[in-house]
Amino acid sequence: MPKFCANLKWLFTELPFLDRFDAAARAGFQAVEYASPYEFSAAEIRGRLRACGLRQVLFNTPAGGGSGMACVPARRDEFRDGVRKALDYAADLDCGLVHLMAGIVPSDLSRDTAAAAYAANVAWAADQAEPAGVRLVLEPINQRDVPGFFLRTQEEGAAVVEAIGRERIGLQFDIYHCQVAQGDVTRRLEALMPAIAHMQVADVPGRNEPGTGEIAWDYVFRRIDELGYAGWVGCEYRPATETSAGLGWLKRFSA
Ligand SMILES: O=C(O)C(=O)[C@@H](O)CO
Ligand SMILES: [Mg+2]
């Protein structure tokens, strides 16, 4: 069974954000991820991580009021400031992965222009991240949840990873997005595993706990193990009722 970390943007939302670290630790998680630490000082978050004995696995570059901006040429300076800020937080929180948010292609921009900006921004960011000991990850997001998001498929993300170098950046394979956008999840896991640096899970269609929808998680988790994936899997789902009451799937699928 893979090792799971709690996504504190989606889980334990019954509590204020800084109280979610203790709740995650009490629920048995050893690591956490979330979208944005920036509303708090790194010292505040570091204090919670240390008090709860939790590891910080991942967070995102600043979203810029949306889903990032790496594909938008006019926002390059804002993008670069965000990467620098993310790397500062990553150093303070001893976080090895940062999700570089691609952004939505503006309606007046051609996809080729967005792709050129994205490639240049990812390359620049990888040059900043490498000496900081941070591996950037790129996540394709389905077009139903985020229409116009730049990275649409797992293969598009993997192609950028291969172009920049998988030892420098990786693919954030969110099984929920893969199922919604493309399906054929385990074949894509098999084909793209060398590029995958992080995974996330939620069931389809409700984006609730594994076991509440159409995905055969016992088979998927078995294939992830058989493929030798040693990274973390983020629990990025909306609890169907209350977070702790919904954690039974961890036992159900690990039996
Ligand atoms: O939406 C998702 O899926 C994520 O992983 C977010 O962190 C990106 O917005
Ligand atoms: Mg995700």
Image (cartoon, grey):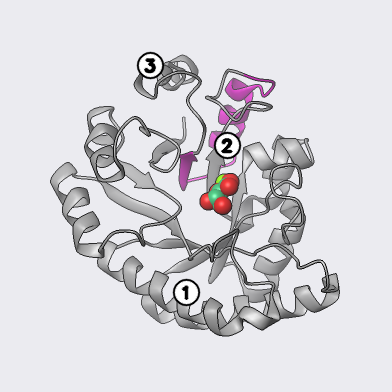
Amino acid tagged 1:
Gly
Is residue 223 part of the magenta span, yes or no?
yes
Mark 1: secondary structure: helix
Residue appearing at x 41%, y 34% in the figure:
11
* Residue 191 as seen in the image, left or right of residue 27: right
Which portion, as a residue range, is magenta? 213-235
Does 225 appear above or below 116? above
Residue appearing at x 52%, y 24% in the figure:
209
Residue where numbered disc 1 is placed = 82
Does 101 appear above or below 119? above
How crowded is the residue under tag 2: few (<14 C-alpha within 10 Å), some, or many (20+)? Answer: some
* Residue 125 as seen in the image, left or right of residue 142: left
Nearer-the-camera pick, 88 or 65 = 65
Residue appearing at x 43%, y 56% in the figure:
59
Q: Position of residue 148 (x, y in %)?
A: 77, 57
Q: Position of residue 10 (x, y in %)?
A: 45, 38
Residue where numbered disc 3 is placed = 245
